[in-house]
Amino acid sequence: MENWSQNSEQEVILNHFKDFKGRFLDVGAFTGKQLSNTWALSQSGWSGVCIEPSPSAFVGLMQNYKGNSNVILVNAAMSYNGAGLIDFADSLGDAVSTTSVTHEELWNKVRSFQHIYVNTITIREILRVFGEHYDFISLDVEGTNIEMLKTFPLELMNPSLICVEHEGRFQEVLEYCKGYEEIYRNGENIILKK
């Protein structure tokens, strides 16, 4: 099977779930296929919700999931401090678009950004509209992952596996995710199981 994730995340995820068919939440889904921790799950019969704020990446997300009614697509940015409009630095088809000024400054020397305003949503709105339970959560929002994670009511959502882009702050991830243990870590992501 082709690997769609950034590193070996897909292998760890598939080994954890084996033949189980569940439901995922992919926050920062990009095109849904490229650099994806959920594409292989969707292709094996999982359902889920993909959230992506970048208009250019969202076009790819729509194309990749065309005809798949099991996956809901949301064109908005996740927010950890309330819904509304936010300044979004779109990297025009690259995977480093962000709402974080610090993250944009980090990439600004090698990427070009177009500033646009996008609508934001909170995790509570996602849970209210699309349901509370997710077996797997993938969180990759370029620069605000830890702040975002800390708004997720994990006891309510009850995922058995979580993958977070840790930004070097994996200790904060471990401290927030009580009842979970680390099973994989690389330079970008940490995966925890319940």
Image: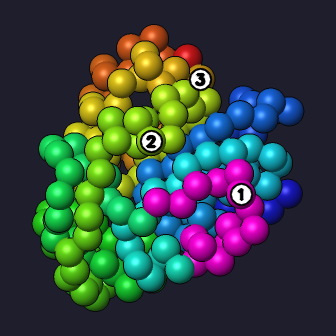
| Label ID, residue 69 | 1
Dots 1, 3 in contact, CB < 8 A: no
Mark 2 is surrounded, within 10 Å at the Cα level, by few (under 14), some (14 to 19) or many (20 or more) other residues, namely few
Which amino acid lies under the numbered mark 1 shown in the image of this protein? Ser
Q: Residue at x 81, y 46 (%)?
A: 45
**Magenta stretch?**
60-74
| Image coords of residue 19 (percent x, y) | 86, 33
Q: Is residue 189 visible?
A: no
> Is residue 152 visible to us here?
yes
For badge 2, the amino acid type reads Val
* Percent coordinates x, y for residue 47 in the rendering: 69, 45
As drawn, is 188 to the left or to the right of 87? right
Q: CA distance from mark 1 to mark 2?
A: 16 Å
Give the vertical position of 174 relative to 116 (above or below).
above
Residue position for label 3: 160
Please say whether residue 71 is one of the residues in the magenta stretch.
yes
Asked if 72 appears above or below 138 in the picture, the reply is: below
Residue at image point 32% right, 59% down? 77
Q: Is residue 53 left or right of residue 102?
A: right
Report the Cα–Cα distance between label 3 and label 2.
Answer: 21 Å
Q: Quadrant of the C terminus?
A: top right
Element marked by disc 1:
loop
The residue tagged with tag 3: helix, strand or loop?
A: loop
Considering depth in this image, is 24 or 182 the residue closer to the camera?
A: 24
The quadrant of the picture occupied by the N terminus is bottom right
The numbered mark at residue 129 is 2
User: Can residue 21 be found in the magenta stretch?
Assistant: no
Q: How is the image coloured?
A: rainbow
